[in-house]
Amino acid sequence: ADAVAPRAAVADAVVPGTAAAAAEAALDAVREALPAHPLPAVLVDCVDRLLAGQALAAEDAGDWPTAIALYEQLVAAAPDSPAAHTRLTAARTELRLATTLDTAARAHHAGDWPAAADAYAAALTLRAGDPALTARAAYVRGRVAESAKDWPGAVAAFAECAGAARARAPYADISDAALRCAYARGRVASDEGDWATAVTAFGACRAAVAAGGVGADGPGGAGEVPAGAGRAGTRGSAAR
């Protein structure tokens, strides 16, 4: 959001929210007491700066509802201010993004892959090209394909995100993408009778499981391995 409008154009400094609220209340009282008299521009500008500082502080804290409410006050007070309008629009977008990411994370951890795919797709319309979002959208496509036993589709999707950098909350963990890609590649190879490739792919799965890099922490966790991944490629195992 910060790239949308220079923060310095909205306020020169961040001030305590209590000071902004008190100043706004005092200004309203003056307006009521002197309805026929225009307020000094310097006084109005001072209050606007206090409100803008409080709004920027709310942005930094990720408190988008508060930031939106404050920017709405600024827009009402200074309707011709491009910076205030731009920051208000950006704050509203960030609130929608935060809400959408929360929906995506909940669906992801619940193993509801179609719902997670829809939520990540919606998030990408708000932050197009974001690497973390793009990787997670690919990951859930892989999980959908995996559930449908569409192994070529799973390979393609997991390959897109196998090297994704780790990301902090609210982004879900997808660190098992490379393992899942290897397993899906093994399934494709075994279906095609390419046993050498299948053995290599399944061997990579067994090595990852044996190394303790993944476990089995439920449908929404990155640690949950594909069924049979720890046994795949061993004598007597059934890849299919």
Image (spheres, helix red, strand yellow):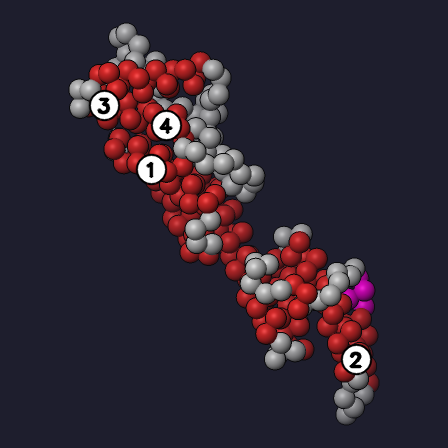
Mark with earlier residue (3, 2):
2
Helix, strand or loop for disc 3: helix
Q: Which residues are magenta?
A: 17-22
**Would you identify the image quadrant in which residue 207 lies?**
top left
Quarter of the rendering containing residue 8: bottom right
Q: Residue at x 80, y 71 (%)?
A: 23
Quadrant (top left, top right, bottom left, bottom right) of the C terminus: top left
Report whether residue 35 is seen: no
Which of marks 2 and 1 precedes in the sequence?
A: 2
Q: Is residue 214 above or below residue 162?
A: above
Could you tell me how far apart the alpha carbons at marks 4 and 1 are, in whole angstroms?
Answer: 10 Å
Which numbered marker is on residue 42?
Answer: 2
Q: Which residue is mark 3?
A: 189
- Residue position for label 4: 180
Residue receiving disc 1: 157
Q: CA distance from mark 3 to mark 1?
A: 17 Å
Residue 163 in picture, x, y percent from top left: 43, 33
Q: Residues within 10 Å of mark 2 (few under 14, many from 20)?
A: few
Q: Give coordinates of residue 4: x percent, y percent.
A: 55, 63
